[in-house]
Image: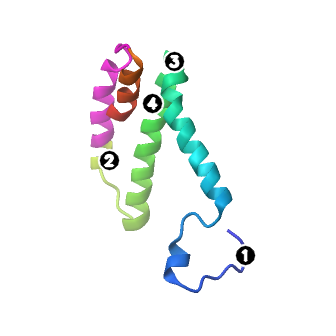
Amino acid sequence: MRIGDAKQTYQADEAIWTSSTQKFWFSLLLLSLLVFPFLANAYLLYLGCLVGIAVISTTGLNILTGFTGLISLGQAGFMGVGATRWPGCPSTPGCHSRLRCCWRG
């Protein structure tokens, strides 16, 4: 964020994407995330799913502790449920099942 970039309205202050360059790079990231499961081998897909699960859980924990200042054991419970569902995913063949595996965890 630029220094001295004061916004005049609430909508401008809450805007996430303020330039076309940010929109371009974000759309490129989304496109690469959508194509990745169809082009990656089994090991890279496994690593990508583990990273995705870790990012989702840490983001949730960051939002929980950042906004409220509380520590919740429910977060660990949700991670445990995701971890118990994961072992059946890598053995499923096919491209569409690969995509399902990432969303399933």
Instruction: Indicate the quadrant where residue 93 lies.
Output: top left
Q: Secondary structure at mark 3?
A: helix
The residue indicated by pointer 4 is 49
Disc 1 residue type (three-letter): Ile
Q: Tell whether label 1 touches label 4 (CB within 8 Å).
A: no
Quadrant assignment for the N terminus: bottom right
The residue indicated by pointer 1 is 3
The residue indicated by pointer 3 is 43
Q: Is residue 82 above or below residue 26?
A: above
Residue in the picture at 33% in, 39% down: 79
Residue closest to the far bottom: 8
Mark 3 or mark 4: which comes first in sequence?
3
Image side of residue 23 versus residue 53, left or right: right
- Please provide the residue range marked out in magenta: 77-93
Magenta stretch: residue 73 in it? Answer: no
Determine crowd level at label 1: few under 14, some 14-19, many 20+ residues with C-alpha closer than 10 A.
Answer: few
Q: Secondary structure at mark 2?
A: helix
> Between marks 2 and 4, how big is the CA–CA gap?
18 Å
Return the mark for residue 75. 2
